[in-house]
Each structure stands twice: as structure tokens, then as C-alpha cells.
Image (cartoon, rainbow, N blue to C red):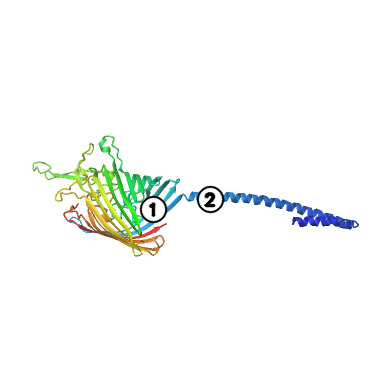
Amino acid sequence: MKKNLIAACVALIIAAPAMADNATDLAAAQAQIDSLKQQLDRLEATVDYLKANASAERKDTAVTTADVSKLKDSAAKYTWSGDFRYRRELIDVASDNLSPDHTRQRDRIRVRFGVLAKINDTLNAKLQFSTTNNGNDSARSTNQTLGSSWDKKPLSIDQAYVDWKASPMVNVQLGKTPIPWATTASYFWDKDLTTEGAALRFTRGPLFAGAYYDWLNERNSGSSQAASADATMAGFQVGFRQSFGNSTLTAAVAYFDVNGVQDQIAKGSQKVTQTVNLDPLSTGYGTVTTTTTTCAIDGAFGNGSGTGDNSFGNSLYNGGAPQAGSATACDRLLSDFNIITGLVQFDTKIGAYPFSVFVDYMKNNGAKAVAAPISKKLDSASAIGFTFNKASAAKSWEFSTVYEQNGKDAVFGQFVDSDFGGGATDAKGFAFKGAWVPATNWTLNGTYFLNKLNYDGVASTSTKHELDYKRVQLDLNYKY
């Protein structure tokens, strides 16, 4: 357009002499020339303005691209995860000589969400929150039972740790972590447990090993150094995992030493002593005098159960602890726990279907013999089970069965699964599980526990043994 205006101006200038004889025409031509110059000036100003804005837009685009790139780099450092579970549960416990059959039905929810943050090429940090069982009274459950006056359900820190890859073969974890040692589908360890301390893990080819140090209860007594002894657990595991074709064989042995729990108070119910005045000459003849002692459950046996029994099946005795400062007669843990474990698991395929089978064994070398009429150590536990197929992709399914018998003092009661046998030792029986995935990230699970309690022959409330225990769980699981 600019060129056309210039050409028009030149043409008018050339034609001007031909119009000289006509003053009126000349004046009109001059006016047209002036008008064309003004338009040219305006167009030049517009062009300059558009050039300036185009340059600014290019700069803004460059800045925006850089910001988006930074945001993508930042977001790549975080991996988010979470799940929601709705559970329908029915529990049926057979009667003993002192109490009737007990049945219960309830609905429960579990919510978990967390983030794994990449700090640098060798260091990650994990933070996960979850619902908490009845406030904060069980390390073995993240369920909240519905039907408590529509109250608000609490969240707690479920995991909080750093994971340092010190070398291609060594990892160090510090904080509150998932169970860091290899386990099977047995019920020796509740899978909701999150240990608190440090774990050193080593892998090289098919070999793996780990060393662990964890806190159970930090104690502090200004009056007695002996009473301040902390409850801790130290352990190690060695094993191998070798693949060949479509199959993998895993085997491992481990040792765990639970310190500072023997002789500690595990049952907080009041101790009642009654005496009757049998002196007929006394003014108080026939009266009954009652004295009580309230025993506070030690922190190594969990929190929140008040005067309840937190031994979860482990053998107790009534008396004062050997260490100074704890002379009160209360129900205390009988045995120490120096646990040896061994497991073997074989994963393969039967046709197109994944198949896994395992054997698990545990023995407590620190167990003491229980009192008559049993008068023996109840120190071993064993489990065997299999899983057929795998519920992962949409429309997939799986089925599994576990048979387990868990001796009264084979496993520290705070570690055993909270569902099998009512969450206590001295239980045996089957667990049948099935799962189906109707759509991506949505799984339906069903579990049926068919157990016997008191199979070791030591009943806590009567002389009747091997009580029937049945439990059904129907779960809707959603991942997000």
C-alpha cells in the first residue's frame, strides 16, 4: 500500500504542469498531494506500531514457553497416589463357657493419599496420609468404622521417610516406612504396619539383604534408669530372587530381636482383691473389703485401649516386673521375642494364568513355657498358600487361599494381622480371597476367614478351647 501511495504522488507531480493553466485544478491537485502525504505518515506510524507489538509478543511467547518448561520439570518431580475403600464386614465368634455367641456387622472406610518427591538423582522422599482406626489406637489398621454420630474422621501420617540410593546396590531408608523386608501373603505381619526407624537394603544380581532398627516405645523415667529402657526391634534378612523363563523363585531367612517388651504391662484391667471379715465378734462381721489396682498399659502394646487387654494372644503372668521402679502386680508379658523366620515363594504360569505358591515359617527362641496344664512352649507358626491368576487389568480376576496356624507366643502380638483370628495369636484356619476388576482402577474383593481360636489349648476365659471364628469382608476398592 505504501508503494501505491508513493506512485500516486509522483504521477500527480508530473501531471501538475499540464494543469498550470487552470489554477483551480492546481489547487485541487496540491490538496490531494497533501492528503496523500498525511495518509502515508499515518500508515508509516501504524507499521512502526505493529512492528513494535510483534517484537513484544515474540518476547512474551518466549517467556511463557520458559515458564511452562519449568512447571513441567517441577511437576515431574512428584508422583501422586491414593485409594479409597468401602468395606462391608460380618464377624461371628462362637461362645465359650462364660459368654454367648458374639456377632457383629459394620461398614468401614479407608482413605489414603500420598506423594513421592524426587529430591535429586539419588534421593527421594515419601509422605502419605491415611484415615486412622478409632483416632490412633491401632498400628495395624487404617479403617474408620461408620456409625459414630456422623463425627469427623481423623487423618494421620501413615508414611514419612527419605530413601537414599547410596550406590547401585545399596538403599538407605529413614523415617516411618512400609515393611522393608520381604514377606509373603501369610498373616504373620499385618500389611498396614509402617515401621519407624532405619533400614539398610542391599541387592546384587539375585541376592538381597537388609538390616533394620526400629522403635516400639521410647521410655523416659527420671527415677529409674532401668525403667527407662526403650522398647526396640533390630533385625536382618538375607535371601535370593532368581528368575528363569516365566518363573521366579524367592527364598529368605531373617532374625528379629524385640527388646524391652518382656515383663512390661500388656493388660490394663483392674486387679480386684476381696476379703471377708469372718470374725463374728467384730462389728464388721460378714462385710467384704475390696481393693483395686489400676495398671497402665505400656506404650509398646499400643495406645487407646484403656483398661483392655493389649497382649493380642501372647502369654501373660501376674506380678511385678524385675526392674526397679515397677513393683506393682499387673498382667505382664511372659516371653521375650527372638524370632527366626524363613520363607519360600515360587511364581510361575499355568498356561496363560499367573500362579504363585508360598511356604512361611516363624519360631520364637525367646518363648517361655506356659503354666500347667499345658506346661510347654508355644513358639512356632507356619503358613502355606497360593494365588491363581492376577486381578490387575480391567475384566481380570484372581483367587487365593492361605492356611495358617499361629502359636500363642510365636509372633509378637502387635505384629500379627488384625483380621485373621480376630487379630490375635493362638489362632489357626483358612482365609479364602477373591478379586475381580470390572473397570480400570476399580476392584471388587471378597475375603472369608474360617478360623479356630485357642487351638494351643490355653483359653483366656474358660476351659473350652478351639472356638469357631468366622469373618466375611466385601470390599470396593478405587485407585486414583
* Screen quadrant of the C terminus: bottom left
Q: To which residue does mark 1 refer? A: 112
Please indicate whether residue 232 sits to the left or right of residue 31 in the image.
left
Please indicate whether residue 112 sits to the left or right of residue 372 in the image.
right
Please indicate whether residue 29 sits to the left or right of residue 77 in the image.
right
Vertically, is 323 above or below 251? above
Nearest to the observer: residue 139 or residue 232: 232
> In the rendered structure, which amino acid carries the disc numbered 2?
Ser
Q: Residue furthest right?
A: 21
What residue is at 27 percent from the left and 51 percent from the top? Answer: 342
- Judging from the image, what secondary structure is the residue with disc 2 in? helix
Q: Which mark is residue 260?
A: none
Where residue 59 sits in the image (x, y, percent)? 61, 49
Q: How many marks?
A: 2
* Screen quadrant of the N terminus: bottom right
- Judging from the image, what secondary structure is the residue with disc 1 in? strand
Where residue 6 sits in the image (x, y, percent)? 78, 55
| Crowding near the residue tagged with mark 1, few <14, some 14–19, many ≥20 C-alpha atoms within 10 Å | many
- Determine the image quadrant of residue 120: top left
Nearest to the observer: residue 113 or residue 272: 113
Asked if the residue at tag 2 contacts the one at tag 1, i.e. Cβ–Cβ closer than 8 Å, the answer is: no
- Determine the image quadrant of residue 283: top left
Q: To which residue does mark 2 refer? A: 69
- Determine the image quadrant of residue 279: top left
